[in-house]
Every structure is written in C-alpha cells, then in structure tokens.
Image (spheres, rainbow, N blue to C red):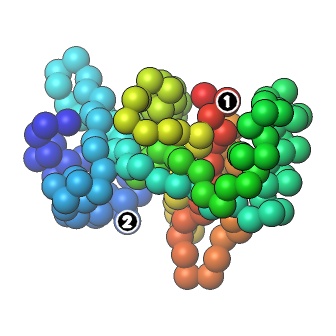
Amino acid sequence: MHDLSALKNFECGIPKMDAFIQNSLHLSIENHYCLPYACEDEQGKLVAFFALSFDSLSLDEDDKADLALDLDIKGYPIESRYSETFYGKSRYPALEIAYLAVSKEYRKSGIGSTLLNAIFDIAKSQRVAGCQFITVEALVTNEYSAVGFYAKSGFSQGELLKAGKETILMFAIAQDF
C-alpha cells in the first residue's frame, strides 16, 4: 500500500476503528510499527487491508501444557529432538496482525478469510525471521467482536478479556497455516 490517502475515506462500519484508520493509522505505518497491504476492487477502490508487525508470544507453563495438548490433538506434535528446546523457551517468534479491516460494503463476503490466508502465506514464505505463531489483538466492544471470526479461522484465545481492555490476544500455531 503506497498511497495512504485511501485510508482517509475507508469505512469498515465500526466507529472506533474507522476513526483510528482515518486519523491515526498512517502514524503507525510511517513510524515503521507495521507494514500495510491493500485489497482493491476492479476500479482501484480500497475494499480491505491488513498490516503486519513482528511480535513474540509469551507462554507460561500452563499455556505450554495447553499448547502441547492442542498440538497433539491436531496431530502436530513438536518433534522429539526439538521438544525440550521448544518448551524450554519463554517467548516464541510470531507475526502480528496489527490491523485487519474490511470495508463495510464487503463485510461477510469472505474477504476477511481470504486476507487471513494471504497472511498465512506471508508468514510461511517470509525469510526475515523465525515465525512459529501468528498473533492478533482481536477487538471486543459492545458493538463488535472479532473473536468469533478468528476462532473460526483456527486462532486460540491467549487470555481472558480484562477490565478496561477492548482486545483479546489470540494466536494461531505455525502448523495451522
């Protein structure tokens, strides 16, 4: 996404997100917090976008036990030669979905899932750093919750909703993408 002026008129239909996208997102991009990717229609109108950042996922011992069980259930056990190293770490390399928004005219059209597949492809193919997880702070407000969308797409909740916070950390395991 080279022309950030398209963000000024972008509306996803969630007032808090729209205000941020139109007024402040450009600062995150210009200050190298995230790298944006655009999805345009045939006329070149911005219909969706996402932005990615590097991240890391911290897991405590209970989280690691849950992860081990989840990996076994899904048929993705950590290779035995690497298991001690993997579970001995406190932080894991991840790619963060810093922002993902679909224009209100295109919501519920499958574009969000298509963008997630593109993000999974980027995570698999990037050669800059290790990537064992994809993380996202899923928005949860009275008007909107992204938790169901991400859960349906294979993400697990990494925390419970905390008072005063409008997001929930969610993550997908590398083998899932």
Who is closer to the viewer here, 135 or 139? 135
Q: Place residue 115 in its image quadrant.
A: top left
- The residue beneath circle 1 is 175
**Would residue 76 appear left or right of 159 to someone viewing this image?**
right
Q: Position of residue 130 (x, y in %)?
A: 50, 39
**Would residue 157 appear left or right of 5 to someone viewing this image?**
right
Q: CA distance from mark 2 to mark 1?
A: 33 Å
Who is closer to the viewer here, 40 or 126? 126
Q: Residue furthest bottom?
A: 164
Q: Residue at x 60, y 28 (%)?
A: 177
Q: Position of residue 138 (x, y in %)?
A: 55, 56
Q: Place residue 129 in its image quadrant.
A: top left
Q: Position of residue 24 (x, y in %)?
A: 22, 64
Q: Position of residue 91 (x, y in %)?
A: 60, 57
- The residue beneath circle 2 is 16
Q: Amino acid at mark 1?
A: Gln
Where disc 1 sits, the SS reads helix
Where disc 2 sits, the SS reads helix
Q: Residue at x 74, y 37 (%)?
A: 82
Q: Amino acid at mark 2?
A: Lys
